[in-house]
Image (tube, helix red, strand yellow):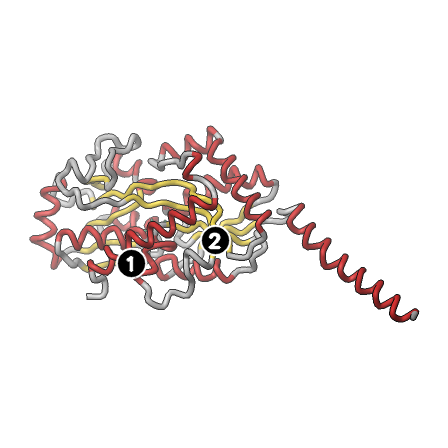
Amino acid sequence: MGSILSRALAALVALGFAASPAAAQTDDYPRRAITLIVPFAAGGPTDVISRIISDYMSRSLGQSIVIENTLGAGGTTASTRAARATPDGYTIEMGHMGTHAASVALYPNLAYKPDVDFAPIGLVAGTPVLILAKKDFPPNDLKAFVTYVKGNVATLNMAHAGVGSVSFTTCLLLNSILGVKPTSVPFNGTGPALTALIAGQVDYMCDQIVNVVQQVQAGQIKGYAIGTPERSPALPNVPTSREAGLPEFQAQAWNALFAPKDTPQPIVDKLTGALDKALDDEQTRKRLLELGSVLPGKAERGQQALAALVRREIDRWTPIIKAANPTD
Ligand code: ASP
């Protein structure tokens, strides 16, 4: 009898122990630093957006957010690591249109499913994509660019951040519209790719606006067109692809935060709340807007809106990528 009682007591105590730390883990989250995996090199658009948004989020969460640049395979190495991380809220990822949409069609054996293996936290920023070239690239407008690239493709190099990246995918779209296949030069992010473009070591590139506003304004590189229906207030002199005569080039990328799936809902909610606050913060908004980001309105924020965006973007990019035959 005594032993039954003590076993029952022990079981109760064990239950109590099992339940309370779990509750405590979500209630007082975060109790230590959070790692934010950035799938590209420091200094590029994904890295810069991550640093701006985590700066505010860490202050409102009361813990530091440590950026970990995990490089390789167009951002898919990092996303695999994020998908497999312990789902406790202490490892999250800044994904984007490449890692969480385009990579599905570009990697037949992708080790994660962007729409299944993550708990979406929320959209951080829309990032229009521009067609760019080194400053002494001969053409001065998009029409001349098209003619020049078609006529000289055998000698041209196109920079990108790896198969699966935004820069790879959007220039794949551009090249397929033009019917060209230049030599492609991969970097670990468009931060280093931009350095090579400024130095004239590569000829052209497609990239997210947040990487290039200053450099286009300063004339260090050429910006031929922006792949969105409207011009960007951050670069008002760069025409839209429609205005410049290439309306088929529609390329708006985005960055968004993801946790591994099975991260406890109260923790994901805290992260979503902190992101929401950051997106309402005047200083954070100013920093992102100056770089040409398009900030999500209330309806585009949050977990469900991001889940829907990921599915829509997989559906949008898969046929474009298949039609462009990236493996040819
Ligand atoms: N913008 C890059 C891309 O092409 C990556 C980066 O953020 O460095 O996906």
For label 1, the crowd category at 10 Å Cα-Cα, with few meaning under 14, some 14 to 19 and many 20 or more, is many
Residue 218 lies, in percent from the top left, at: 26, 34
Q: Earlier in the sequence, mark 2 or mark 1?
A: 2
Q: Residues within 10 Å of mark 2 (few under 14, many from 20)?
A: many
User: Does the rendering let one see residue 43?
Assistant: no
Residue at the (75%, 60%) spot, across then down: 15
Q: Residue furthest front?
A: 1
Residue 61 quadrant: top right
Residue 257, percent from left and from top: 46, 47
Residue 55 percent location from the top left of the image? 51, 39
Q: Residue furthest top?
A: 282
Residue under numbered circle 2: 37
- Report the side of 27 relative to 74 (left or right): right
The type of residue carrying mark 2 is Ile
Pointer 1 residue: 186
Residue 276 is situated, as x and y percent measured from the top left of the image, at 50, 37
Q: Nearer the viewer, residue 237 or 261?
A: 261
Name the element at disc 1.
strand
Q: Is mark 2 within 8 Å of ligand 1?
A: no
Q: Is residue 302 above or below residue 99?
A: above
Q: Which mark is residue 220?
A: none
**SS state under label 2:** strand
Q: Which quadrant of the view contains residue 159?
A: bottom left
On screen, residue 248 above or below 161 = above
Is any atom of residue 80 visible in this view? Answer: yes
Tell me the quarter of the picture where residue 73 sits: bottom left
| Spatial separation of the CA atoms under disc 2 and disc 1 | 20 Å
